Amino acid sequence: MKRTVLLTFSIAILSVLACSKKTDSGQPNANYKNLEKDFITWWTYHENNIILSSNFIAIDNLSNRISKEDFFEKLTSGDYIPLKLNSKDSLVYYKLFKLDEGSNSEIRQQIKRSSTANYIHFKAEGKPFPKFQFFDLNGTEYNNENTKGKIVILKCWFIGCHACVAEFPELNKLVNNYRNRKDVVFISLATDSKEKLNQFLAQKKFNYAVVADQTKFITKELNVSSYPTHLIIDSNGIIRKVVNKADEMILALNDKEFLKTSLASIPSLPASN
């Protein structure tokens, strides 16, 4: 009798614990059944609603809160798509929805590619930035020592990358917004030669410090294979954010919670309006 009571009590406790992992974060802001049938419909939704580099609460397909790492691992299988939930608070919730067997194959391929890239970025965050010694086109030196105590905003790019060049105006505006901040440094690593960069930048204004011939450092030390790639490095030389879009980098830079947890020793950055 005692064993039966104990077993019943144990099952009840386990049930409570299981339920505690569940979350009632609202309903998705779209019907995944409609999204999974057509690539363009899904891609339009995904681009307008999902930012995997942002601060979000990860929810699996069973409505359990999970770690971001588990979330990305499931996404990289190509079997799930994330949907944003209509939350009752200010937090952002992304929930996984399992794709049916008859869903559009292009969606599976694309979500696998994009989430794999985001997962690689996520795993790089929190690690020390490699030892470096850069000299920009003007001969100014940047290294681990003289950037200590500063936020380093880094961009990896090359001349032939249309997306890299297209975001110059947005980044120039960002640099201008922080022109009076001595604790924020903007550096770009380019794969092109000094000669080609000087010729190109004579026609295209770019306010970052530009360092030439950085293919080896970009690919071997940073493990970057797509362009553009942006990194935010904190005052202690720790990589805090890795993204491929300028607007996502700026979003992270201005995220108060991000600043609070990652750059606590640095005064809040001004908004880039």
Image (cartoon, rainbow, N blue to C red):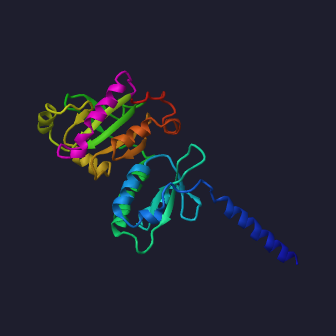
146 in relation to 228, above or below: above
Snapshot quadrant of residue 119: bottom left
Q: Residue at x 48, y 57 (%)?
A: 30
Q: Residue at x 36, y 65 (%)?
A: 38
Q: Is residue 204 left or right of residue 72?
A: left
Residue 46 location (% of width, % of height): 40, 55
Residue nearer the viewer, 211 or 87: 87
Q: Is residue 253 left or right of residue 136?
A: right
Q: Quadrant location of the C terminus?
A: top left
Please tell me whether residue 269 belongs to the stretch shown in magenta. Answer: no
Q: Residue at x 63, y 56 (%)?
A: 24
Inspect this view and state whether residue 269 appears.
yes
The boundaries of the magenta stretch are 157-183
Q: Which residue is farthest right?
A: 1
18 in relation to 49, above or below: below
272 in relation to 233, above or below: above
